[in-house]
Amino acid sequence: MAWRLRFPHNLWLAILGAVPGLVLVLLLAEPLRLNRDSRVIGTLLYLVPSVAALFGFNQTWHTLPRVGCEKKLQPQTVTLSFPHTRE
């Protein structure tokens, strides 16, 4: 859908965010005793990957830091010009 609408969203980053979110819930289910109640783990299995996918989907490649592609920032000068006044 984002490709057709040409929004600056990224589907691959959404998938990349949802999968670790799902794995995180499954790995922490036993130590945090999330599987004591099926409603708790069911809710977390829905919310955590959804929020992680939403965060990844709204990231663009332009906002992500690229390793090895750092640009050297040049100091920029600002020139102020005032209108000339007659005395």
Image: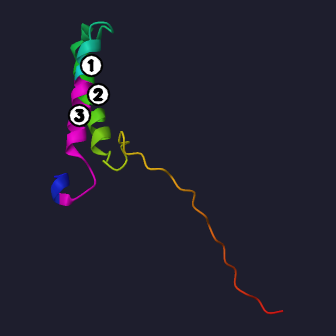
N-term mark: 3 or 1: 3
Give the secondary structure at mark 1: helix
**What residue appears at the point 29 percent right and 39 percent down from the top-left corner?**
56
- Viewer-proximal residue, 78 or 44? 78
Q: Report the amino acid beneath label 3.
A: Leu
Verify CB contact (< 8 Å) between mark 1 and mark 2: yes
Mark 3 lies on residue: 16
Q: Specify whether residue 43 is in view.
A: no
Q: Secondary structure at mark 2?
A: helix
Q: Is residue 15 visible?
A: yes
Determine the main secondary structure of the stretch shown in magenta. Answer: helix
Q: Which mark is residue 35?
A: none
Expressed as whole percent of the image width and height from the top left, the position of residue 25 reads 26, 19
Q: Position of residue 30 (x, y in %)?
A: 27, 7
Q: CA distance from mark 2 to mark 3?
A: 13 Å
- Which residue shows up at 36% across the image and 41% down it? 68
1 or 2: tag closer to the N-terminus: 1
Q: Which residue is mark 1?
A: 25
Q: Which mark is residue 48?
A: 2
Q: Give the vertical position of 28 relative to 81 (above or below).
A: above
Magenta extent: 5-22
Figure label count: 3
Q: Position of residue 70 (x, y in %)?
A: 42, 45
Residue ID at (70%, 85%): 83
Which label sits in the foreground, 3 or 1?
3
Q: How many neighbours does mark 3 have within 10 angstroms: few (below 14), some (14-19), or many (20 or more)?
A: some
Q: Is residue 12 magenta?
A: yes
- Amino acid bearing label 1: Val
Viewed as shown, does residue 87 lie left or right of 47? right
What is the distance, in whole Å, between disc 3 and disc 1 at their CAs?
A: 15 Å
Q: Amino acid at mark 2?
A: Val
Q: In the rendered image, which quarter is residue 15 located in?
A: top left
